[in-house]
Image (spheres, rainbow, N blue to C red):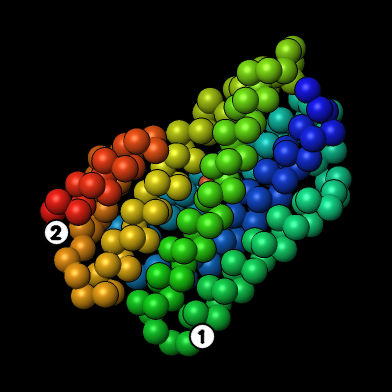
Amino acid sequence: MNNDQIEALVLQSLEHELGGIKVYQAALECAVHPGLKKEWSNYLAETRGHVTALEGACAALGIDPQRELPGRAVVRHVGGALVEAMKLARAAGDAAAAELVACECVVLAETKDHLDWELIKKCGEHLTGKAGAALSEAANEIEDQEDEHLYHSKGWCRELWIQSLGMPAVLPPPEEVQKVKTAIGAARAEQAAEQAR
Ligand SMILES: [Fe+2]
Ligand SMILES: [Fe+2]
């Protein structure tokens, strides 16, 4: 195992979760549909928990959670750009358009979040001792939440876009109704939405 790269992954993940709090705060300002607001409010609370879990993982792995690395600065920059994009959309004054922008920003952010936790889980499986146990414990608790964050937000994004185009939309999206937690489940939910149109 490459310990430097494990440290980079944990610190990028921490930075991304810290940015994720700001992304959800901005996204909630843009959300219009009450179901989406409720969903994202839960994800904001869970994201705060992910910060705490990663701070705990840093302690277990002997990583300084404040350490600056080039990759971490990039993650912070991307998160800030997503927040700026949502502010720009809101300033334009079209609430439905801003909601779509927020959906896209959340999907982009959650794609990295999902990858981070998939990789953290793999590191936990391969590392031995206290470090491996700490990563596995955190990932086992959080991985399901990240599946929901990504797949459900993708469903909202697709259906709200379809509604905006004047086609029949399935809201809330089947991903949420079916409590999808896997890629194959998400594919089935999308198919169900197509059949319902
Ligand atoms: Fe997260
Ligand atoms: Fe997430």
Find residue 101 and report its horizontal and vertical position in percent: 46, 71
Q: Secondary structure at mark 2?
A: loop
Q: In this rendering, would 106 be left or right of 67?
A: left
As drawn, is 152 to the left or to the right of 117? left
**Would residue 120 appear left or right of 95 to someone viewing this image?**
right
Pointer 1 local density, CA inside 10 Å: few below 14, some 14–19, many at least 20: few
Assign the C terminus to one quadrant of the image.
Answer: bottom left
Callout 1, which amino acid?
Ala
Residue 108 lies, with reference to residue 139, above or below; the image says below
Judging depth in this view, the residue of 185 and 117 nearest the camera is 185
Q: Nearer the viewer, mark 2 or mark 1?
A: 2
Tell me how many marks there are: 2
Q: Position of residue 39 (x, y in %)?
A: 38, 52
Mark 2 lies on residue: 197
Q: Residue at x 39, y 54 (%)?
A: 154
Q: Which amino acid lies under the numbered mark 2 shown in the image of this protein?
A: Arg
The residue positioned 21% from the left and 75% from the top of the image is 166
In the rendering, which numbered label is found on residue 91? 1
In the rendering, at what x and y percent does residue 104 appear? 46, 63
Q: CA distance from mark 2 to mark 1?
A: 33 Å
- Which residue is at a point 23% across and 47% down the rendered structure image? 191
Is the residue at mark 1 in contact range of ligand 2, meaning its CB lies under 8 Å from it? no
Residue placed most toward the observer, 94 or 189: 189
Position of 189 relative to 97 (above/below): above
Q: Earlier in the sequence, mark 2 or mark 1?
A: 1
Point out residue 96 in the picture as x, y percentages from the top left corner. Answer: 35, 77
In which quadrant is the N terminus drawn?
top right
